[in-house]
Image (cartoon, coloured by chain):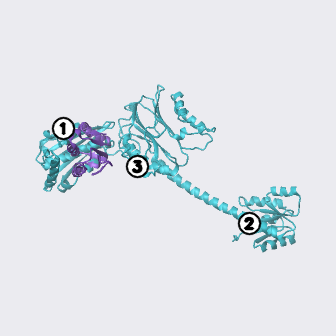
Chain colours: A cyan, B purple
Amino acid sequence: MLPSNFKILIAEDSEPDRMLLDRIVRAEGYRTVLAADGQQAIDAFQRELPAIVLMDVMMPLVDGLQAARRIKALAGENFVPVLFLTSLNDEKFLASSLESGGDDFLAKPYKPIVIAAKITVYKRMVLMHRTLQQQRDKIAKANEHFRREQELAKKVFDNIAHMGCLDQLNIRYLLSPMSIFHGDVLLASRKPSGGLVVFLGDFTGHGLPAAIGAMPVSEIFYSMIAKGFGSESVLAEINQKLKAILPVGFFCCASLIDISYKKQRVKLWNGGMPDIVLKRQSGELVRHPADYLPLGILPSDQFLPGMRAYEMSLGDKVYVWSDGITELRNPAGQMLGQEKLVSLLEQGDKRNAFDDLLGAAQDFSENLAREDDLTMAELTMLPPESVPSKDPLRFSGVSTGAQDWAFSYELRRQSIVDFNPVPLLLQWALVVPGLQAHNQNVYTIFAELVSNSIEHGLLKLDSSMKSDSAGFRKYYALRAERLQHIDQEWIRVEVEHWARDGGGELVIAVSDSGAGFDFDSVSKEFPKETVYSGRGLPLVRRICSSLEYVPEENKVKACYRWALDEKV
Amino acid sequence: MSISSECSPNGETLIIKVSGRFDFSSHHDFREAYEQAGKGVKSYLIDMSEASYLDSSALGMLLLLRDHVGSSEADIQITQCNPEVLKIFKISNFEQLFQIS
């Protein structure tokens, strides 16, 4: 089926010839448009948009060659074959007429069978050309749509991935994407204690799949660092998440740099990345090669990230890069390579080593399509006092949480019998930024003081029952039985926290309506290893700066002092 | 707080996995885990990778396990403790009684 606009323009000044051609062409089933000279042909082309043009060469006013040029120009990117009608046999002329835009000849006198065959051939070409144009336009449109979607997604991604503190003065970095998204992630966050943690990850693959993996990584990184979790815990959490979401064979090479200004120390972890290089002011280079598997490969029970600590001095620098840099090739096909980069750092100017690296990367990548993502960063050790210690808990992009507060929580009847208040109390207390790193200690204080109040204060249970396995069982059976008789009793938990310079003080006091108990005998010393009970309060005593008993109030009061930088 | 256990393929190691809070409410399940294990069990591995917190009654339970096995020759490993839990074991001097990592 031909499209209804598939017309054939016949431009011929001799009327008998025009009529003859018109008959031949219409007999083949085509619609025709007729013109008697070149100008008419041009006008008819603009009006009727014919698909094929049969054009006499010698015509008055505008001749066939001129008209052909004009029609080709008007047709633009559409393919409109022009077939010259000529009785001339001069080969030079035939050649020059093709140069002026014609596609073929039809020799006079006309032979219907030849004309029909040629029209069929050009009809096929025109239709093929139109199909290609349509497909091209469709692809271009789809591509444009895809690009817009990616740009939008990239905005979201950038907001998540780059809300950190890469803009700090002691961080220089290069992050150049291969596509709109890239497989590299560079994250930086200040620790609540004032130090700095930088994470460089390189996902297998590029584009959307890599970017999707980067989202949970940055979420986990920023939220856990802000809450005061240690770098090892952050790595373990990221590994677990990636292991759960990435298909087999996809993973994330990563390195993590944890700088403490106060201690003038850096801790490094390298999972499948190029060497991390530490450059000292003295010129000495220390290389920290990959000593762990990338993230997302090992199940969490086999992933045990250990970090190595290096002493640093003011001005010492740490360099990290992804393999996109080392695998750059210059036009001669040579790879930039790890050794070349390290030797640049070795020879390079102390101050401008990063510029040397940038220069080398640029030399190698010039005029080349980037084969991988290029990411590198330089971190400089700052003096200890560069940590704003007056305001240690306010750092970028993270809500600071409540630091100065007090609450009292009283449990009565049913809530003493079958509700464990410890998780709730813990959750309230841990809103203090940085206190999360001390969660087990805070748990210990709550758990031991509360169970002490219930078991000894209210229920009058005797711990010495727990002298063997059967005793353990009996003790907890008795505990359950006595709880059934709870009626007017209560337990009160009073908690206070206030911020101190670089940390805080948490006071937890638990009192009850019982008759009191012999505090000293259960809290002073750890029992021997053959005794299975009585460790609760001694444990609390060891953790806390003070633990006291107020007999008249039946109250045990523990004071826990903590510091942000304290290594748990 | 849940306790699960399984034997190694050769039946010589009992692996007890603690999830969530390791506190007095686990004492029944924890005891059952080692009392019901086969006769061939020679060593014990307490997997703490999923444990969030532990309290002093959990310490008592671990000592009971040690006693059950025969205190001095007990081969009990407590593995994959998070750093905070590790600190509690340290304060309680448990490192002298168990292999803790």
Badge 2 marks a residue whose secondary structure is helix
Measured in 3D between alpha carbons, the distance from the residue under mark 3 to the one under mark 2, in whole angstroms, is: 60 Å
Asked if disc 3 and disc 2 are in contact, CB closer than 8 Å, the reply is: no
Whether residue A325 is situated above or below residue A426 in the rendered picture: above
Determine if residue A478 is in view. Answer: yes
| Label 1 in the same subunit as label 3 | yes
Badge 3 marks a residue whose secondary structure is helix
Disc 1 crowd rating (10 Å Cα; few below 14, some 14-19, many 20+) is: some
Badge 1 marks a residue whose secondary structure is loop
Q: Disc 3 residue type?
A: Lys
Q: Disc 1 residue type?
A: Phe
Q: Disc 2 residue type?
A: Lys
Disc 3 crowd rating (10 Å Cα; few below 14, some 14-19, many 20+) is: some
Residue A12: percent from the left, percent from the top?
84, 67
Residue hosting label 1: A526
Can you name the residue that lies furthest to the left here? A515
Which mark is drawn over residue A241?
Answer: 3
Whether residue B41 is situated above or below residue A58 in the rendered picture: above
| Label 2 in the same subunit as label 1 | yes
Whether residue A419 is situated above or below residue A264 in the rendered picture: below
The quarter of the picture where residue A83 lies is: bottom right
Say whether disc 1 or disc 3 marks the residue closer to the N-terminus.
3
Q: Where, quadrant-wise, is the C terminus of chain A in this rendering?
A: top left
Depth check: give the residue in front, A43 or A252. A252
Residue A154: percent from the left, percent from the top?
51, 50
Residue A139: percent from the left, percent from the top?
61, 58
